[in-house]
Image (tube, coloured by chain):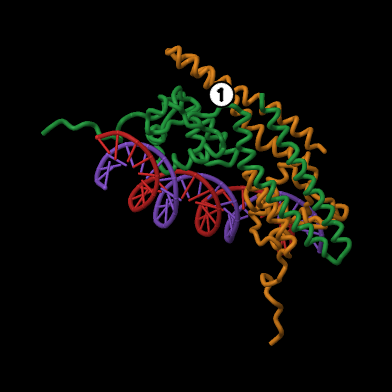
Chain colours: A green, B orange, C purple, D red
Amino acid sequence: MPPVNPPMDTVQDHLDPLERQVVDVFVDGVRVLGLPRSIGEIYGLLFVSTTPLSLDDLVRRLEISKGSASQGLRTLKSLGAVREADGNGGAERRTYYEPAVELKRLVGGFIREQIRPHLDSGKERIGRIAATAGEIDDPVRREFLSDRIERLEQWMNSGGKVLPILQRILGQ
Amino acid sequence: MPPVNPPMDTVQDHLDPLERQVVDVFVDGVRVLGLPRSIGEIYGLLFVSTTPLSLDDLVRRLEISKGSASQGLRTLKSLGAVREADGNGGAERRTYYEPAVELKRLVGGFIREQIRPHLDSGKERIGRIAATAGEIDDPVRREFLSDRIERLEQWMNSGGKVLPILQRILGQ
DNA sequence: ATGAAAGTTCAATTTTTATTGAACAAGGGG
DNA sequence: CCCCTTGTTCAATAAAAATTGAACTTTCAT
């Protein structure tokens, strides 16, 4: 009987304590932003890694499924938070990822993907509400509502104004 | 046989279409902030209501449990997003609530309760990470990490600086 | 062309989070 | 005091969200 190699899934290849700590900071961070844990894990591991990592690296080291890794990378790409690394001059088939570490870019991506759409749809909905409220008969009620709606609109405007300022301040 | 009154839970007392629309805007809004739907419903209903509402009003009109209403109000109070209304000169036992509608106050409360604690614990954790990283033998790895950690610290500082500015801008 | 490696998709499942509801406290008024 | 109204707490349950994994597509080396 020939000697057997240890089964693949026994290979100890997971996170060292430092990596674990860094990953946990990002897990917490993305939680605040309303993003799933796996996204924090992926970005965090890329962030502590000296070299770019492939999807398979992430699966193996974080012990997450290929599905999670694929979807997590997709979201991170859409946020502009990771980019494909050139690696060795495109000589490889597999694609490797590295984190975008400029705060400006991260904030910009988050605003574009997660904040703006809500602001925009909110404005539309408030427009419709204003129309409905305009047809109310009772004048007291109608004026009360027009007041509140106006305030909502002000909020939205403030939001719209503050975002570019945010981006400017965080761009160093 | 005497005539029976309609059972209490059949009373049609729920939201009219306008109230529903407004509540939905807030449900969406708090979702972005990572707060539960019931909190958006409660704040939203207070926001469209001409008069302050009691816990029981919220339970009845939103068809949520007393537990939800109680916990939701607690969170909203801690955020400074609702206040107890004086009603009729404290002559009532039951307490009534009205929304705080100044954006400044809402933003301030959210930052204080939901953002600051994370920023603070993040800073601590990064401090510990920096200590761990300082003891690494491989100089290449150590310098890479000190670079990344420094960047993380910059992010935290930017966050700390931007919050007061945010609050100032949104204070009108 | 063929097949193996790489990556995506999405229904099923697990995990997490929010909500319920019943038991419990608080606090008047009679 | 006692009891009724108001409000809180928290274990059990329901609802929502994230993750898995297997089937599928794409891509490239031979």
In the image, taking residue A2 as reference, residue B68 lies left or right, namely right
Measured as percent of width and height from the top left, residue A34 is found at: 58, 42
Residue closest to the eye, A89 or A27: A89
**Quarter of the image that includes the N terminus of chain B:** bottom right
As shown in the figure, which amino acid type bears the numbered disc 1?
Answer: Ile
In the image, taking residue C19 as reference, residue A4 lies left or right, namely left
In the image, taking residue C22 as reference, residue D19 lies left or right, namely left
Give the quadrant of residue A158. Answer: top right
Give the quadrant of residue C30. Answer: bottom right
Q: Residue furthest left?
A: A1
**Residue drawn at point x = 46 percent, y = 23 percent:** A18
**Residue drawn at point x = 57 percent, y = 34 percent:** A29
**Residue drawn at point x = 71 percent, y = 65 percent:** B14
Density class for disc 1 (Cα within 10 Å; few <14, some 14-19, many ≥20) is: some
Measured as percent of width and height from the top left, residue A150 is found at: 82, 50
Label 1: chain letter: B
Q: How many marks?
A: 1
Residue closest to the eye, B26 or B79: B26
Give the quadrant of residue B94. Answer: bottom right
**Quarter of the image that includes the C terminus of chain B:** top right
Measured as percent of width and height from the top left, residue B124 is found at: 59, 24
Measured as percent of width and height from the top left, residue A33 is found at: 60, 39
Residue closest to the eye, A105 or C15: A105
In the image, taking residue C14 as reference, residue A22 lies left or right, namely right
- List the residue tagged with mark 1: B126
> Circle 1 — which element?
helix
